[in-house]
Image (tube, rainbow, N blue to C red):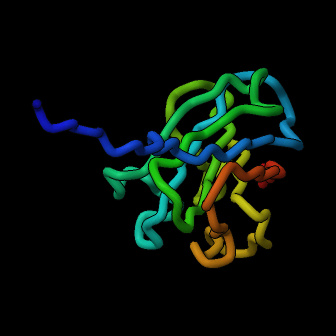
């Protein structure tokens, strides 16, 4: 008789989802550039974090959409309303010409907020609502 082999029953790991809603858009033109990172040194510029989640969502669809976090952890989100769809934030004399926002909606004075003020725990599916800010 052959030995009975049993496979360990393991649940597939499902990445948590951040349901994101953007409010306060001044128009539905262009796209929303989204950056989700766990790296404080790469916030808010995800280009410095190869493990970050970066995506673009049409502004018309920004009221509610999902961002999939790779794993559970502490994350922060930065968003830009890229109204002209050139895949970057346009500035004029060091001031953003396009809208921006951050998870937990921290107060923005000079420069972006700290990772700590925008960070939140992702252990399961969560929701974040980000209010856009416009300087010009």
Classify the position of the N terminus by image quarter. top left
Return the residue nearer the eye: 91 or 40.
Answer: 40
Image quadrant of residue 74?
bottom right
Q: Is residue 114 above or below residue 94?
A: below
Q: Residue at x 28, y 39 (%)?
A: 6
> Residue 89, can we see it?
no
Q: Describe residue 28's horizontal placement relative to residue 77 as left or right.
A: right
Above or below 25: residue 129:
below
Q: Give percent across and percent down for residue 76.
A: 59, 62
Q: Residue at x 77, y 50 (%)?
A: 127
Asked if 87 appears above or below 107 in the picture, the reply is above
Residue in the picture at 78% in, 21% down: 60
- Tell me if residue 55 can be seen: yes
**Residue furthest toward the left?**
1
- Foreground residue among 60 and 51: 51
* Residue 36 percent across, percent down from the top left: 54, 52
The residue most toward the front is: 1
Numbered circles on residues, count = 0
Q: Name the residue at 65% across, 34% down.
A: 32
Q: Quadrant of residue 34?
A: top right
| 45 is higher (above) or lower (below) than 69 | below
Q: Nearer the viewer, residue 38 or 61?
A: 38
Q: Where in the figure is residue 18, as x and y percent of width and height?
A: 66, 46
């Amino acid at each position: 008789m052959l030995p009975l082999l049993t496979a360990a029953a393991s649940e597939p790991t499902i990445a948590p989802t951040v349901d994101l809603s953007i409010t306060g858009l001044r128009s539905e033109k262009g796209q929303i550039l989204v950056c989700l990172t766990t790296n404080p040194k790469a916030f808010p510029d995800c280009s410095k974090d190869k493990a970050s989640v970066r995506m673009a969502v049409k502004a018309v669809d920004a009221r509610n959409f999902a961002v999939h976090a790779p794993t559970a952890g502490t994350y922060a989100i930065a968003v830009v309303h890229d109204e002209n769809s050139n895949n970057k934030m346009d500035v004029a004399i060091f001031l953003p010409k396009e809208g921006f926002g951050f998870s937990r909606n921290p107060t923005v004075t000079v420069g972006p907020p700290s990772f700590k003020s925008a960070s939140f725990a992702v252990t399961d599916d969560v929701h974040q609502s980000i209010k856009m800010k416009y300087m010009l």
